[in-house]
Image: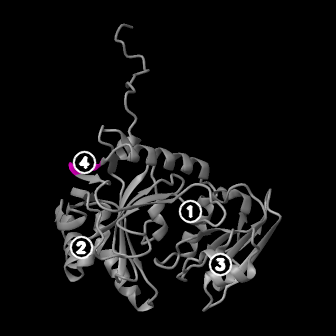
C-alpha cells in the first residue's frame, strides 16, 4: 500500500499554520505516511516513538517549542504529556491503543480529519454550552422507544469537557476532534463514589458499542468477546433504568436484544462500578462515518446534528471502559429546544409540495 500523503495545513484543529508540524508514529507506521507542509508551516518533522519511551519525553526532548504535534501510534497506549513536557506546543492524539484499529481505519480517520471544520466545531460547542447553561433541566429522549431521562446538571458536582475547536498553545485534544461531554468528576480520574446525581429516568441504547481496554494484551480476547456480545445493540435496543446516575435495571426491547441485555446485566453484577454512568458524551463531528467495528474514534461521530453517547467505567480502574452510541436519541432543554441529536436533524415547519402536473383539470 503506497504511503498516505498528508498536507499538514489541512488539519485546521491546529489553527493557523505556523512553526513546525511534527508527526509522531509508532515504528511500524514509520513508512506509512508522507508529509507535505502545504502553506504556512516553516518545516515538517516525522519522528517515531521508541518502545519504552513516553510521548511526553519524546516531545520535550525532540520537538520544537512552537510545533503542532500529531501523534498516530496504533497499538500504543499514550499517557498525556505533563504541562512542562508539552509547553506551548499544540497536541492532537489519535486514540489508537485501547481498541484494535486496522491500517485502513487509521488512514480513514486521517483523511476525514482533514475535512473537519474546527471553527464550525467551536461554533457548535458555543451554542451547545449556551443552551445547556440556560436550562437547569435537560432531557434525553428516544422518540422511537418513548424513553426519557432527565438530567439536572445543577445537582451535585459535574465536569464539562470540550474536545472540539481550535487548539491553543499548550492544549491537547483527541484526533479527529469533535466531542463534548459531562462527567461525574475529572475525566481522567475515576472516583467510585462520584455520580451524575441529577440523571434519572430511562435511557435507550441502540447503536454501535465501543469496548476499550488498558495495556494488558491478555485482555484482548475478552475485549473482543464482550464487543461481539454487545453487538446486537446495533439494530436492537435495550432500556436502562437510571436513578441518581446509577443503572438499576437493563431491559431488552426486542427478543434479539435479550443476549446483549444479559451480558450487560452480568457485567453490572460482577463489577458494580459499571453501574455508574460515568460520562454523558455528545459527538459533533459530522465529517466522519461510523466504522462498523470496535473502534474508539467512533465516539466523535456526530451524524448530521450530533449524537448522544454514554460511558461506563474507566480504565485502568475498571478492566474495560464501555461507550454506547445512541444516534436515535436527542438532548432537549426544558422548553423543548433540541440541543443536538435526532430531533435537531429533523427539519420542521417545511411544507411538502407536489410539483408534478396533478391538478386533474387537463
Nearer-N-terminus badge (1/2): 1
Nearer-N-terminus badge (2/3): 3
Q: Find the distance from the CA under tag 1 to the CA under tag 2.
A: 29 Å
Q: Residues within 10 Å of mark 4 (few under 14, many from 20)?
A: few
Residue 264 tag number: 2
Q: Quadrant of residue 29?
A: bottom right
Pick the front one: 120 or 37: 120
Q: Confirm or deny contact between disc 2 and disc 3 (CB under 8 A).
A: no
Nearer-N-terminus badge (1/4): 4
**Residue bearing the label numbered 3:** 85
Q: Find the distance from the CA under tag 1 to the CA under tag 4.
A: 30 Å
**Residue bearing the label numbered 1:** 176
Q: Find the distance from the CA under tag 3 to the CA under tag 1.
A: 22 Å
Taking the image as shown, residue 309 lies to the left or right of residue 10, namely left
Residue 149 tag number: none
Nearer-N-terminus badge (3/1): 3
Mark 4 or 2, closer to the camera: 2
Q: Find the distance from the CA under tag 2 to the CA under tag 3.
A: 40 Å
Residue at x 49% of width, y 67% of height = 297
Q: Residues within 10 Å of mark 2 (few under 14, many from 20)?
A: many
Mark 2 or 3, closer to the camera: 3
Amino acid at each position: 500500500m503506497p504511503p498516505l500523503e498528508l498536507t499538514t495545513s489541512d488539519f485546521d484543529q491546529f489553527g493557523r499554520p505556523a512553526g513546525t508540524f511534527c508527526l509522531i508514529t509508532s515504528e511500524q507506521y514509520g513508512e506509512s505516511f508522507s508529509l507535505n507542509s502545504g502553506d504556512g508551516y516553516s518545516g515538517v518533522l516525522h519522528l517515531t516513538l521508541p518502545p519504552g519511551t513516553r510521548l511526553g519525553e519524546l516531545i520535550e526532548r525532540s520537538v520544537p517549542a512552537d510545533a503542532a504535534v500529531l501523534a498516530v501510534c496504533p497499538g500504543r497506549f499514550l499517557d498525556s504529556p505533563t504541562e512542562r513536557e508539552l509547553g506551548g506546543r499544540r497536541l492532537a492524539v489519535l486514540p489508537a491503543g485501547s481498541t484494535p484499529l486496522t491500517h485502513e481505519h487509521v488512514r480513514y480517520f486521517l483523511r476525514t480529519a482533514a475535512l473537519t471544520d474546527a471553527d464550525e466545531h467551536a461554533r457548535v460547542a458555543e451554542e451547545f454550552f449556551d443552551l445547556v447553561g440556560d436550562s437547569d433541566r435537560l432531557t434525553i429522549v428516544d422518540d422511537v422507544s418513548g424513553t426519557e431521562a432527565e438530567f439536572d446538571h445543577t445537582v451535585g458536582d459535574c465536569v464539562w469537557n470540550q474536545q472540539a475547536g481550535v487548539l491553543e498553545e499548550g492544549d491537547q485534544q483527541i484526533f479527529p476532534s469533535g466531542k463534548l461531554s459531562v462527567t461525574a468528576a475529572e475525566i481522567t480520574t475515576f472516583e467510585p463514589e462520584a455520580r451524575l446525581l441529577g440523571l434519572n429516568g430511562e435511557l435507550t441504547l441502540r447503536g454501535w458499542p465501543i469496548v476499550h481496554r488498558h495495556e494488558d494484551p491478555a485482555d484482548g480476547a475478552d475485549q473482543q468477546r464482550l464487543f461481539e456480545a454487545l453487538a446486537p445493540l446495533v439494530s436492537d435496543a435495550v432500556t436502562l433504568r437510571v436513578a441518581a446516575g446509577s443503572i438499576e435495571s437493563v431491559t431488552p426491547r426486542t427478543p434479539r436484544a435479550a443476549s446483549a441485555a444479559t451480558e450487560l446485566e452480568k457485567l453490572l453484577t460482577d463489577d458494580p462500578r459499571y453501574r455508574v454512568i460515568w460520562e454523558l458524551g455528545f459527538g459533533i463531528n459530522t465529517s466522519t462515518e461510523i466504522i462498523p467495528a470496535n473502534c474508539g474514534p467512533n465516539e466523535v461521530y456526530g451524524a448530521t446534528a450530533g449524537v448522544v453517547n454514554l460511558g461506563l467505567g474507566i480504565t485502568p480502574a475498571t478492566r474495560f471502559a464501555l461507550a454506547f452510541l445512541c444516534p436515535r436519541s436527542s438532548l432537549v432543554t426544558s422548553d423543548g429546544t433540541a440541543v443536538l441529536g435526532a430531533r435537531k436533524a429533523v427539519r420542521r415547519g417545511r411544507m411538502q409540495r407536489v410539483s408534478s402536473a396533478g391538478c386533474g383539470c387537463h
